[in-house]
Image (cartoon, rainbow, N blue to C red):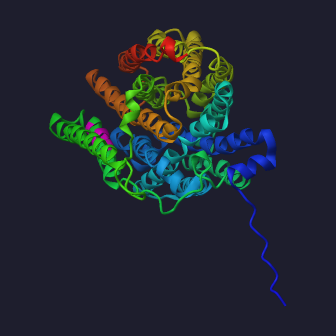
Amino acid sequence: MNAPLKPQAPDHSIAALRARHGERYRWLLLLSVMVGTMASIMSSTIINVAIPDLSQHFGLGQERAQWVSSGFMAAMTVSMLTTPWLLSRYGYRRTYEGCMWLLLAGGVAGGLAQHFPLVLVARVAEGLAAGVVQPIPAIIILRAFKPNEQGRASGIFGMGVVLAPAIGPSIGGLLVDGLGWRSIFYMVVPFCLVSLWLARRYVPTNAPGGAAADPRGATLDWPGLLLATVGTLCLLNGLVALHSGTGSAAVFLGSAALALVGFVTLQRRMLKNHGRRPDGAVAPLMNLSMFTDRRFAMGSIVAFIYGIALFGSTYLLPVYMQMGLGLSASYVGGILLPAGLVLAVTIAIVGRLADRQPTHRLVSIGLALLAASFALMVTIDLSRPGTTIALLVSWAILGRIGLGFILPSLNIGAMRGLGHTHIPQGSSVINFLRMLGGAAGVSLCGIVLEWRISAYGFRLDTASTNPARLTAFNETFLMLAALCALALVAAWRLREHPASR
C-alpha cells in the first residue's frame, strides 16, 4: 500500500496571496507592515518621556542618559543598510518576522533590566530590528501600488504610523507617572504580537519583485557595513565629546570622516567590479550610482537634515517641557496629543495631494512650517501663564502640519526616477540618511542644550523655570529652525524637469 501523501504547505508567494485575496490584498499587506512599523517607531520616540525618571533611577548624567535614545538611533541607522540584502536572501516574511521577534525581546528585556548597561543593550536590539523594518513599507508601496495610488497609500500608511507616536507619549506619560519608566518598554509587546499574526497571513515569502528568496545569493558586504558602523559611532561619540574637550572630539570626528572616505571608496570599487563577478559575489552595500539621479540626490540631502530636525525636536520638546517648564510627564503627553492627531489627519490629506501635486512644492511647504514652529517657540513667556500652554499646543500643531506635508511625499518623490531594481536600495539609503541625521540630531540637541545652559550658569538635570535658563532652550530651537531653512534649498531642486513629466 502506498504511503499517504503529505499535504502540501500553502503557497505564500506574493502571486498566490494576491490571487487568494484579490484586489484588496495590497492594502492587507500594507496594514501588516504598518503595525510592525508602528511598533518600531513607538519604541524609538516614546522613551523620551521616561528619560528624566530613568536617569534619576540609575543616577545618570545627561551625557549617558541620552545614549538611551542615540544608541537606539545608531543601531537603527546602520541596520537599515542591510534591508535589501536580507530581503533578497530570506524574503519578506522571514526578515519581517525575525525583526518583530527581536523587537519584542528587546522590549521585554529592557523592562526587566536591573542595570543600565542591560537597558542600553535592549535598546540597541530594538534599534537593530526597527532599522531593518523601516525601509520595507516604501518598497511595498512603490512595487505593489500603481503610480496614481502611491501617494494615497503613503498617506494612509503614514496616518496609521504616526498615531503610535501621537498617542504614545500621552499613554507613556501616564505610565511613567503611575508605574515608572519600565512600563514604557512593554508598550511595544502587543504591537509586535499583532504584527506577527498578520505576517503569517499576509506577508509573502518572496523577495522584492516577486522572485524567490535565494539563501545562496550575494554575500553581505561586511567591510562596508563595518565602515558604516564605525563611522556612525565615531560621529555620535564625537558630537557627545564636543562639550568636554576638543581633543577627543577631534579624534572621533576625524575618524568618522576617514570612515566616510573609506566607505565611499570601497563602494565605488565594488560597484565597478560587481558586474564582472559571478553570481554569489559580494554586492555593494550602497549603490552610489543612484546619486546620479538629481531628485534622489536632493531628496537624500533633505532626508538627512529633516532627520536632524525631526528626531532632535522629538528629544528636545519633552525635555523642554519637563526640565524647562516644570511640567509632569503625563501633562507633556497631553500637550503633544493634539499635535499628533493633527499630524495623522494632515498626512492622510497630503497623501492624496501627492498623486497630483509636485513633490518639491509639498516638501518645501512642510519645511517652511516646521522651521516656523521651531522659531516661534521663543515667544513662550512664563510671565504670562495663561498663554503658555496655548502657545505650546499651537506651535507643536504647526510643526506637525509641516511634517504631514513632508512624510508622504519625500520618499516617493525622491525615488520615482530610480530603476525598478534600485527601489529596495533607494528606500534603504533614504531611510539610512534620515536616521543618520536623526541619530546626530538627538546628540546635537543634547550637546547644544547642555552647552548653552552651562553658559548661563545652570545645570540641565535640575528643573528650573529661570528665564535665562529658558533662553538656552530657545537658542537650541532656533538652531533647528535654521537647519530646516537650509533644507529648503535642496527641497526646491526636487522638482522634475519638464521633459521628464
> Where is 219 relative to 328, above or below?
below
Q: Quadrant of residue 7?
A: bottom right
Q: Quadrant of the N terminus?
A: bottom right
Q: Give the farthest residue toward the left.
A: 247
Comparing 447 with 89, the one in front is: 89
- Which stretch appears magenta? 232-238
Q: Give the farthest residue toward the right.
A: 1
Q: Position of residue 406 (x, y in %)?
A: 54, 22
Q: Is residue 20 magenta?
A: no
Q: Is residue 97 left or right of residue 491?
A: right
Q: Main secondary structure of the magenta part?
A: helix
Q: Is residue 236 magenta?
A: yes
Q: Is residue 500 left or right of residue 210?
A: left
Q: Position of residue 109 (x, y in %)?
A: 53, 58
Using the rendered image of the protein, determine whether residue 36 is visible from the camera's viewpoint: yes
> Where is 49 relative to 188, above or below?
above
Using the rendered image of the protein, determine whether residue 173 is visible from the camera's viewpoint: no
For the point 75% across and 62% down, which residue is it? 10
Q: Is residue 414 left or right of residue 266?
A: right
Q: Position of residue 24 (x, y in %)?
A: 78, 39
Q: Quadrant of the C terminus?
A: top right
For the point 37% across and 21% down, which residue is it? 476
For the point 30% across and 23% down, which residue is it? 452
Comparing 112 with 167, the one in front is: 167
Q: Position of residue 478 (x, y in %)?
A: 39, 15
Q: Give the farthest residue toward the front.
A: 276
